[in-house]
């Protein structure tokens, strides 16, 4: 199946990425640091701005803004996912999916991710609020400010 992605040079996008089989991979400082390292490495080669982010044990949400002449967030996500897999702190989890095992693939991420083009300031604000409220929604903390892996200030 061919997926159609929004192509908006300089666009601002909301993303959701999920770990393979919803495994809670981002539960310790080393795994969070690995993801942060991936963002730094990719941003150095393919600039983008992270406007908001929350890293949950089994998924993450974020908003990115791309440079004015660039719409290729798909490449950036591929690079981030690859970097995390190559630099994972400790043994990689075995893929539960037999098809992945047969292809010799690692199983850190779901293949797909969800993206949404941010349309206006209200849309941006709603998505930032959603991102920052996510740890509360999932019952990890009572206040968004208490979640350490978020851009909430």
Image (cartoon, helix red, strand yellow):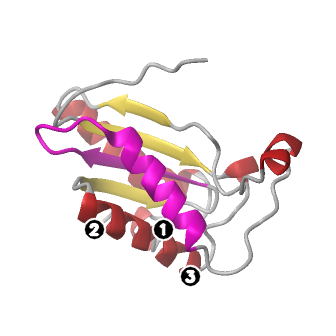
Q: Are marks 3 and 1 in contact (CB under 8 Å)?
A: no
Q: Nearer the viewer, mark 3 or mark 2?
A: 3
* Residue ID at (53%, 38%): 113
Per the model, the C-alpha gap separating discs 3 and 2 is 22 Å
Q: Is 21 situated above or below 152?
A: above
* Residue ID at (18%, 32%): 9
Residue position marked by numbered label 1 in the rendering: 35
Specify which label sits upstream in the sequence, 3 or 1. Answer: 3
Residue 119 drawn at (x, y percent)? 23, 26
* Quarter of the image that includes the N terminus: top right
Residue 81 drawn at (x, y percent)? 52, 56
Say left or right for 1 vs 8: right
Q: Residues within 10 Å of mark 2 (few under 14, many from 20)?
A: few
Residue position marked by numbered label 3 in the rendering: 30
Q: Nearer the viewer, mark 1 or mark 2?
A: 1
Specify whether residue 150 is in view: no
Say left or right for 133 vs 124: right
Specify which label sits upstream in the sequence, 1 or 2. Answer: 1
Please give the range of residues in magenta. 59-87
User: Which numbered tag is attached to residue 153?
Assistant: 2
Q: Is 55 situated above or below 134?
A: below
Per the model, the C-alpha gap separating discs 3 and 1 is 9 Å
Q: Are marks 1 and 2 in contact (CB under 8 Å)?
A: no
């Amino acid at each position: 199946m061919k997926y159609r992605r929004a192509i908006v040079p300089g666009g601002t996008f909301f993303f959701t990425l999920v770990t393979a089989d919803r495994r809670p991979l981002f539960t310790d400082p080393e795994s969070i640091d690995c993801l942060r390292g991936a963002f730094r490495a990719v941003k150095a080669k393919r600039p983008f701005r992270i406007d908001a982010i929350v890293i949950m044990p089994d998924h993450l949400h974020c908003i990115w803004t791309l440079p004015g002449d660039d719409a290729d967030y798909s490449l950036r996500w591929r690079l981030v996912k690859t970097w995390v897999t190559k630099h994972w702190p400790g043994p990689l989890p075995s893929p539960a999916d037999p098809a992945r095992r047969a292809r010799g693939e690692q199983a850190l991420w779901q293949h797909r991710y969800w993206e949404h083009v941010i349309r206006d300031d209200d849309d941006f604000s709603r998505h930032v609020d959603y991102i920052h409220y996510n740890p509360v929604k999932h019952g990890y903390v009572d206040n968004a400010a208490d979640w350490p892996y978020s851009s909430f200030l």
